Image (tube, rainbow, N blue to C red):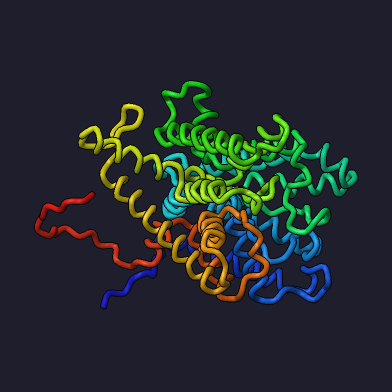
Amino acid sequence: MRKGKFRLSSAKIIALGFAALIITGTVLLMLPVSTADGQGASFIDALFTAVSASCVTGLVVHDTATYWSVFGKLVIITLIQIGGMGVVTFALAIFKASGKKISLKQRSVMQESVSGTGVGGIVRLTGFIVTGTFIFEAAGAALLAPAMIKEFGVLKGILYSLFHSVSAFCNAGFDLMGVKGQYSSLTSFADNHFVNTAVILLIVIGGLGFLTWDDIRTHKFRVKKYRLQSKISLFMAAVLITIPALFFFFAEFGSLPFTERLQASVFQSVTCRTAGFNTMDLGAMSESGQFIMIMLMLTGGSPGSTAGGMKTTTIAVLAAAAVSVFRRRSDPHFFGRRVDDNVVRRAVSLIMMYISLFVIGGIIISMAENLPLLTCLFESASAVATVGLTLGITPSLSLVSRIVLIALMYFGRLGGLTVVLAAVNNNKTAVSKMPRADLNVG
């Protein structure tokens, strides 16, 4: 047997990094100083909260504002910040700040972590991600500050502004509005244009992906020079905000005045991918509206962003593949570029994995809790897509259902292919092929 160094793949490093972050968060949240009553959280409650924060989901079993102490809230927002930027990005930023040389292996891990196209320029991109994150979050806090200061006073208002800005940019969905009503999210600000606009902008900016913003910074309005990924991300974001917003406007919020109706429609359309805030009572929406929200949650944001889900580019590739079949083309096309067969296969695999987990998770929760299947599917979609929206069942779920959601949140944050690659040790590529056979489908 040959002896050699034990090497971890990039996928395993990313998976273990998030696991280490979750374990650290769990231990800290179990300390007596972390809860308002000084008793400390139970292991399963601390684990659930740490996973939800690290995976920037937003599902909670206790109201964040009233259950956790100041220290506990600090732990949660730190987990959100590190989880939103990515454990690898955060670690490499510390390496860079300390003046240490970043190896090729570390660059490769970073490239996979942010869904980059190559290792070239990845250190520069790391600096851009960290700087851009803090700039956007500071700007968001400044936009939220007037409303928060008016509501909670100067010091508390500033701290609340910063907390919600970080949570919104990282698409986490954690809020401190429990002081106005437990699990109320942003419903008390449903008619506040400044809060709605600021949160919408933060969610969209965080969900577009760092590579897209790098293109915008580098090429400004010369869209033709953008990466193909950036073009698809921008196009899909526009479509997935506009069409659902129109549905919500005409089918769900007809009782509201025009301005509030439009604002609520856009907000719910944006927050489903994948922020977890809400300004309306989601339980009062129709089943059709809830199903559309499930589809939006599963779609998610762009690759290399703070958002989760299957990603907009995955859906776009599948749609383009279908169009190519209808038009009898050999390959899918985007903006004058051909999409490789391997990309199509990866997209199909990802969609199959996410849908399978989403359905299986929903069925298990429905059976364990004896609740309607649509309600449980909403919960499982929210977990696997790291959204954080809920129809109100999370705090009352049993241990079995919580474990299911924990697994779904962890899987969803890492991404399907990362989990598969981390679990598979075989690095060999098969060179032999089975005999070909024709098969009719459809």
- Locate residue 80: give its quadrant: bottom right
Q: Residue at x 58, y 72 (%)?
A: 369
Q: Residue at x 59, y 35 (%)?
A: 250
Expressed as whole percent of the image width and height from the top left, the position of residue 130 reads 61, 44
> Does 282 appear above or below 224?
below
Expressed as whole percent of the image width and height from the top left, the position of residue 269 reads 58, 40
- Left or right: residue 183 versus residue 52 is right
- Left or right: residue 10 versus residue 38 is left
Is residue 182 at least partly visible in the picture? yes
Expressed as whole percent of the image width and height from the top left, the position of residue 347 reads 35, 48
> Does 96 appear above or below 365?
above
> Does 409 appear above or below 162?
below
Q: Residue at x 86, y 42 (%)?
A: 149
- Locate residue 231: give its quadrant: top left
Instruction: Out of 94 and 85, give the one closest to the viewer.
Output: 85
Expressed as whole percent of the image width and height from the top left, the position of residue 43 reads 66, 76
What is the quadrant of the N terminus in the image?
A: bottom left
- Left or right: residue 412 versus residue 284 is left
Q: Residue at x 42, y 32 (%)?
A: 227
- Left or right: residue 410 versus residue 59 is left
